[in-house]
């Protein structure tokens, strides 16, 4: 097992972008206050060319966000705004990482994030992730005067690129780049590290450190070294 290095800290004016948030969230933090925890461990197989999604990748709208889908890799089951059923392939692992983390966001309301987290997220921090999502939902719902149980609004993030760190048929780790609107008309871009595990016949996401996707995200100045999703709308 190889322990991945902790992700670097963000600057004082921090832009924390997470695929799971469905948008880009800004936080003003002191560098010393920013939590820097060890990354999840992952088995690193022999290096091989990065898997490609082409030509099967398509894009489907999900509450304002365009998400990648594939007739060969999944998701094969989409109902009630939930998605499951992914092929036991690199493509399936990547698409599971995107779809599950997006749907674990408070943004979509408890009818989406609760079953997503309880059924498709595993690991010791699963309970913490659910608590964080519930707390965020209640706080934002009250601030926006949204009725209990309703979504908080559409997503504004764009899924742009990915970078494999490790893949095996049982465990995979991938960095996913998302971008969203920043202050003064800027675009904020970040990479979120997601680990998925084949469990009970499908890919499931391992909950992030502390149950907070911000602990797995870093601000990006460039997407050099990442593979762009092709055909993105």
Image (cartoon, rainbow, N blue to C red):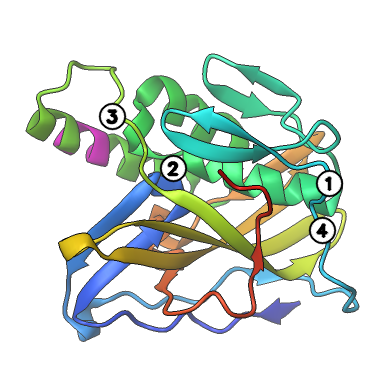
Looking at the rendered structure, the secondary structure element under dot 4 is loop
Q: Secondary structure at mark 2?
A: helix
Question: Element type at marker 3?
Answer: loop
Give the left or right position of residue 127, taking residue 81 as reference.
left
Stretch of the chain drawn in magenta: 135-139
For the residue pair 66 and 177, the one nearer the viewer reads as 66
What residue is at 41 percent from the left and 19 percent from the top?
111
- Quick one: label 1 or label 3, which is nearer the N terminus? 1
Instruction: Name the residue tied to disc 2.
Output: 127
Q: Which residue is mark 1?
A: 55
Determine the CA span between mark 4 and mark 2: 34 Å
Which residue is painted at 34% across and 36% down in the image?
106
Sequence-earlier tag: 3 or 4: 4
Which quarter of the picture shows residue 41? bottom right
The residue singled out by tag 4 in the image is 52
Instruction: Identify the main secondary structure in magenta.
Output: helix
| Distance CA(mark 2)–CA(mark 3) | 24 Å
Which is nearer the N-term, disc 4 or disc 2?
A: 4
Task: Point out residue 198 in the picture as x, y percentages from the top left corner.
Answer: 78, 46
The picture places residue 101, in percent across and down from the top left corner, at 52, 45
Quadrant, the N terminus: bottom right
Q: Nearer the viewer, mark 1 or mark 4?
A: 1
Q: Nearer the viewer, mark 2 or mark 3?
A: 3
Q: Residue at x 43, y 31 (%)?
A: 113
Q: Quadrant of the C terminus?
A: top right
Secondary structure category for the residue under label 1: loop
Nearer the viewer's eye, disc 1 or disc 2? 1
Residue on which the image places disc 3: 153
Q: CA distance from mark 1 to mark 2?
A: 38 Å
């Amino acid at each position: 097992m190889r322990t991945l290095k902790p992700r670097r800290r963000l600057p004082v004016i921090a832009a924390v972008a997470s695929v799971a948030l469905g948008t880009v969230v800004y936080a003003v933090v002191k560098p010393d206050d920013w939590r820097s925890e060890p990354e999840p461990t992952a088995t690193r197989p022999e290096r091989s060319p990065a898997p490609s999604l082409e030509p099967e990748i398509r894009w489907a709208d999900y509450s304002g966000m365009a998400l990648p889908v594939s007739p060969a890799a999944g998701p094969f089951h989409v109902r009630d705004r939930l998605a499951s059923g992914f092929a036991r392939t690199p493509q399936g692992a990547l698409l599971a990482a995107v779809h599950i983390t997006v749907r674990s966001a408070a943004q979509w309301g408890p009818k989406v994030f609760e079953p997503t987290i309880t059924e498709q997220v595993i690991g010791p921090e699963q309970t913490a992730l659910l608590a964080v999502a519930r707390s965020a939902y209640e706080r934002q719902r009250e601030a926006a005067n949204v009725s209990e149980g309703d979504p908080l609004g559409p997503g504004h993030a764009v899924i742009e690129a990915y970078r494999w760190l490790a893949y095996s048929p049982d465990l995979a780790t991938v960095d996913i780049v998302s971008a969203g609107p920043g202050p003064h008309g800027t675009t904020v871009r970040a990479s979120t590290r997601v680990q998925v595990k084949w469990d009970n016949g499908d890919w499931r996401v391992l909950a992030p450190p502390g149950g907070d996707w911000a602990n797995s995200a870093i601000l990006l100045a460039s997407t050099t070294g990442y593979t762009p999703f092709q055909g993105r709308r």
